[in-house]
Image: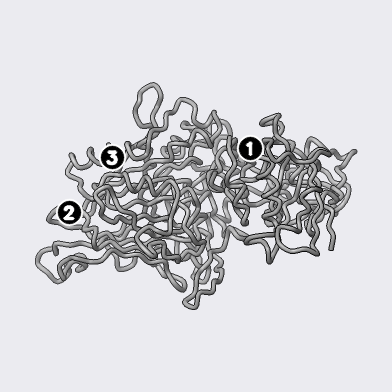
Amino acid sequence: MPATSRPSGRRTFALLASAAGLATAAALASALPADAHSGSGHGHQHPSRYQDVQLLSFNDLHGNLEPPSGSSGRVTETEADGTTKTIDAGGVEYLATHLREAREGHPYSVTAAGGDMVGASPLISGLFHDEPTVEALNKLGLDVTTVGNHEFDEGAKELARLQNGGCHPTDGCYTDKRFKGADFPYLAANVLDEKTREPILKPYWVWQKKDVRIGFIGVTLEGTPGIVSADGVKGLTFKDEVETINKYAKVLQRQGVQSIVALVHEGGFPSSSSYNYDCDSPGAGDGISGPIVDIAKNVTPAVDALVTGHTHAAYVCTVDDPAGNPRMVTSAASFGRLYTDTTLTYDRRTGDIARTAVKSANHVVTRDVAKAPDMTQLISKWNTLAAPIGNRPIGWISADVSSTGTESPMGDLIADAQFAYGKELDPETDLALMNPGGVRAGLTYAAKAGEGDGVVTYAEGFTVQPFANTVNLQNFTGAQLIQVLKEQVSGSNAAAPKILQPSANLTYTLDLTKTGADRVVSDSIRLDGKAVDPAAVYRVATNSFLAGGGDGFTTLGLGTDDLVGTDDLAALAQYLTAHSSAASPLTPPAANRITIVQ
């Protein structure tokens, strides 16, 4: 499953201008009259026939109000000479500035999102049932969004509260002001109440300025129930994305709305990780694969563009519609690192979009612009409220738990915690693997804020695992498991190995004197003391990033029988609490599961 379909777990407790460098650009060949881009017709007695409408969009914010850290806070850019560089990106203080600057000079501008605005959120938002994110989106000027799978992490009633406002039914109000909910509509055209058979939220919304009207239809992936906890989708039915979009496109047309954009929380996989990759080379849509391609090929030609998400990928592509005409399909990665700027040329004579003039580009939310003061204030307010939770003890350790080394004690501890949690989810779980890049820090024995030597606070745990991944279970053959281990030191990881941190029951020898996949000594691999059977099936716990094939572990993206659990930090906290106390602190793992020859 994609690394981005990370439902379920949320950290909750009681208590988008200017572009940086190159921009991904795709444009359909213009075949319009000379005044096709004449704008609002200033200086004319009557408006021109064609009106450019700016569509700004982003997706999969996941409550990342503060600048995301590590790889989650960077984008890759391909330079003119073919080399690549990374750019620090994201953070709503910068996103707000970029969006506000982008809107300047565009009187006809609408901002839309492709789902997963909340869920699997960092501490500052997740602690408060994502009220801070909704508040930020209101200030950002978001006009409309579709729901994503993560909008159902806490169920339909909580989603309705995010839309309509009101204090949390269990945790109450967090401030002296009642939560007012979203100023923008959440669209859920293909999410039906099992009893009424009607959409649980608005299926579509029409943006209008003067005589220009554009309809938006919002859907999430039909497979949401398979990647969200059962409680989150209880009483709901998820319908086919294409059938639903086509149905409501007809509804909009009957209302006289001919310009239509589909907001689809399902995505694709471009052939490059660079945000400015040309996925229309050598031909339209040749550089993208995945579910969104089939959706785009089958959605009615009445729809003029698709804003997508879910896979956390960056692309601006054209995919032919059923009539064989190219149509724009976009996605702005995730975590607020990019936004997409699309020009829709509205034909006042037909009321439709002149699709041959549509152009689009992704832009980096760089951090070299001024911070939006209102967002800085918002972040400060919620961080102050989060402090008491961050100071909560979650465990005790007898010594420092280091995060350094090819195999680190901290990495092993996380793997053990995910294995233990996996066994609770499914007793058939056989092992766990943790990516080293996800271990952002170790745990220190010495007291940091007066909590006492050996005490591990929630804030310290969050520093170790800040990415809000979920713990995922998948089935692999023994042959695939062996291949995963080889991918640590081969392929894209040959030059800079990424050694997975294993749970205690997996051991093997890593011979660094050899090259490539040969560095993993295959006949040394043991699980619970026994050789791995290539034909047998093994249940493996990983985090959601690895489960999507992240860090070059493509085989981990091929697992079956997916089961998604809580977030990784919750699993670590649960493990520490269960296996340590003030009187009996946890001893750091010895980091001896991998025998290294060098």
Res. 453 visible in picture: no
Q: Position of residue 438 (x, y in %)?
A: 68, 54
Residue sitting farthest toward the left: 45
Res. 546 visible in picture: yes
Which SS class for mark 1? strand
Q: Which mark is residue 246?
A: 3
Instruction: Determine which residue is flagged by label 2.
Output: 211
Q: Position of residue 268 (x, y in %)?
A: 45, 51
Residue 557 or 394: which is nearer the viewer? 557
Residue 221 or 57: which is nearer the viewer? 221
Which SS class for mark 3? helix
Q: Which mark is residue 475?
A: 1
Which SS class for mark 2? loop
- The kind of residue on which mark 3 rests is Asn
Which mark is first along the chain, 2 or 3?
A: 2
Is residue 210 shown left or right of residue 362?
A: left
Which mark is first along the chain, 2 or 1?
A: 2
Is residue 103 shown left or right of residue 335?
A: left
Q: Position of residue 595 (x, y in %)?
A: 84, 53
How busy is the neighbourhood of tag 2: few (under 14 within 10 Å), some, or many (20 plus)? few
Which mark is first along the chain, 3 or 1?
A: 3
Instruction: Give the spatial CA distance, label 3 vs label 2.
Output: 24 Å
Residue 387 or 567: which is nearer the viewer? 567
